[in-house]
Structure formats: structure tokens, C-alpha cells
Image: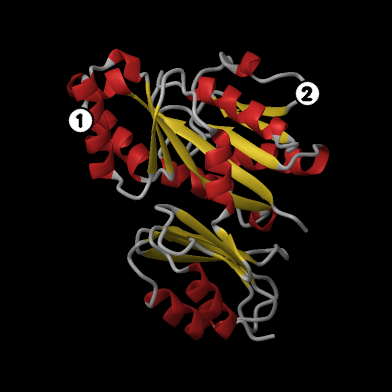
Amino acid sequence: MVKKEVYILSGFLGSGKTTLLKHVLQALKEENKKPAVLMNELGSVSIDSDAVEEDTSMRELLDGCICCTISDKLEAQLQDLLVNEQFDVLIIETTGAAHPVEVVDSILSPLFADRFEFKGIITVVDGKQWKERSQFSPSVLHLMREQIRHAQYIIANKVDLLTEMEQGTFIYELQQINNRAKVYLTNYAKVSMKDIFSEAAEIKIEGYEKASIGRHLSLQAVVYTFKGEVDGEEFEEWVRKQPETIYRMKGYIPLKGKKYPAMFQYSYGMPLFMQADMKYKTNFVIIGEELSKSDILQSLQAIDHY
């Protein structure tokens, strides 16, 4: 089964995400790829949904942030898209208040993680907003930096509002936060999406999904499906050996001697097992930075007894 590609559009409120969304959808159609859109708004009314043409499948998540208060609704919407719509690429436009790690974590539910292929985060940064960022609270500044730090592609937007020297400072400061992302200086979020799509295509290498040689994704997701049974002690030992750059792990683990798979959750070093009461897909999702996907997959295969 061919996985659906997923791109996340991130960026603080008013940075230009919806304008970028229009460019992304147009570029996908020019490549004869059918897009679907999941749009998240904090309010009870969608303001930007008219940016999506009628021939594009769209779902909306209102009244909350995709990564916290409405994550259960997200699963229902994703399931609905997979069952009822035909599409090749899913574009998720997040609310400006969303943290990138939490969004990826919400999207890759073990229930259907094997149906999606996470291709990266495109973060839009408003140049004037960034220059005047001292007016924001420490929590907002932290969120803006996190959105930049976890991006694979940074759209440095509205640069016509900056002098040439300010543009240079803008790029330098973005690269200080994230030196692995590709930075595009733009106005009206106009960027060559073919460039971004071609770079994203290089991430997949025959055999395993992993970063291409010399280039590492700043935020990665690894999905493994257990085929046999797992010894509990072996699995716990495997967890202990994993690097600190893993932020999240979750999934259903088919433990030996158990009728149903156990739900496993791991967040910033804290593991938690919960016994499930039915037969779930034994998908296991790992989210982190600077991961060797091939090494992780091989080590999981070693404890998967089938």
C-alpha cells in the first residue's frame, strides 16, 4: 500500500501560512498529485477555508489546537479522509499556537501511522514580526523559536518590509536557531514548491526511510509494524538504549503471553504501559531529532520474534 505524504505548515499567527497553502495546492496539482487539506483554527469559525478550492478534499478542526484539546477529533477526521477521499498528499495547516513536535505526535496515531509518510515541516516566519519580536511574551517567543527549530524548510516571509541589512540579520538569526533547514527569502510566501518537493523526495532511500547522505531532517518520524511477539524485558532494554533525542514513542506492543497488545507511551524519558482490551494494529511510532532510521528499524526487527 502506497503511503500518503504529509506536510505540515507551521508558523506564528499572521505569518502567511494560508497564502503559502494556496501555492502548495497549485504546485501539487501541476505535478498531477491530488491534495487533501486539514485546517486547524483556534476559533469556532473557519476564516481561511475559502482559500481551498472546491475540488480539493478538506477537513476542519475548530475550537482548539490540533496538538492538545482536539487530538481525539483529529483521529476521526484523518480516518474519514482515508476512508472516504482519494488523495496523494495531505497538507495540514496548523494554528499559529501549535508546537511542531505535538502536531507530528497527534498526526501519527498508531491506528493508521502505516498509512502516512511524514515529509517535513514548512515554517513561515514574518520578517517584520521577527524583527519586532521583543514585544512578545517569553512563552510566545519560545513557541516561535520551536517552530523554526523543528522545520525542514523555512519561509522567511515579507522581506520587502526589511532593509537589505535587516534581511541579512534575519537569515543569520534563523540559521542560528536551525542550521539544517533550507531558508527561502520571500514576499507573499512565493517559493518554488518543486524545489521543496524534490528535496523531500530524496528523504526516502530504497529499503528504509532515512535522511539522505549529508542531510538530516531536524524532526523525524519512524513507523514500525510488529509482525510477531515481543519479550517484555527485551523491549524495556531496547527503550533504555534509545538516544535522548527521541521525544515521543507510542504504539501497540504485542507482548508475549498477552491476549491483546499493550499500549505503550513514552514522552521525554517517561515510559508508560497500559493493557489494551482489544486487538489493535501493532504499529509503533517514534518521533525525535537526529535519528538513524535504519538503525532503529533494524533494532526493532531484532526483538520482533516471528
Quadrant of residue 96 within the rendered picture: top left
Upstream in the sequence, badge 1 or badge 2?
2
Q: Is mark 2 on a helix, strand or loop?
A: loop
Q: Residue at x 37, y 18 (%)?
A: 158
- Of 178 and 94, the residue lying toward us: 178
Query: Image height check: is 208 above or below 123?
Result: below
Q: Quadrant of the N terminus?
A: bottom right
| Label 2 CA crowd tier, 10 Å (few <14, some 14–19, many 20+) | few
- Of 165 and 298, the residue lying toward us: 165
**Tag shown at residue 169:** 1
Q: Which residue is drawn at 53% across and 41% down?
A: 196
Q: Which residue is drawn at 33% across and 15% down?
A: 160
Q: Which amino acid does label 2 sit on?
A: Asp
- Of 49 and 26, the residue lying toward us: 26
Q: Residue 303's spot in the image, x, y percent?
A: 56, 83
Q: Which residue is drawn at 64% across and 31% down?
A: 27
Report if the CB atoms under discs 1 and 2 are less than 8 Å apart: no
Mark 1–mark 2 distance (CA, rounded to whole Å)? 41 Å
Quadrant of residue 50 within the rendered picture: top right
Q: Which amino acid does label 1 sit on?
A: Thr
Q: Residue 9's spot in the image, x, y percent?
A: 50, 34
Q: Mark 2 points at which residue?
A: 55
Q: Nearer the viewer, mark 1 or mark 2?
A: 1
Q: Is any atom of residue 205 visible in this view? A: yes
Q: Residue 251's spot in the image, x, y percent?
A: 57, 62
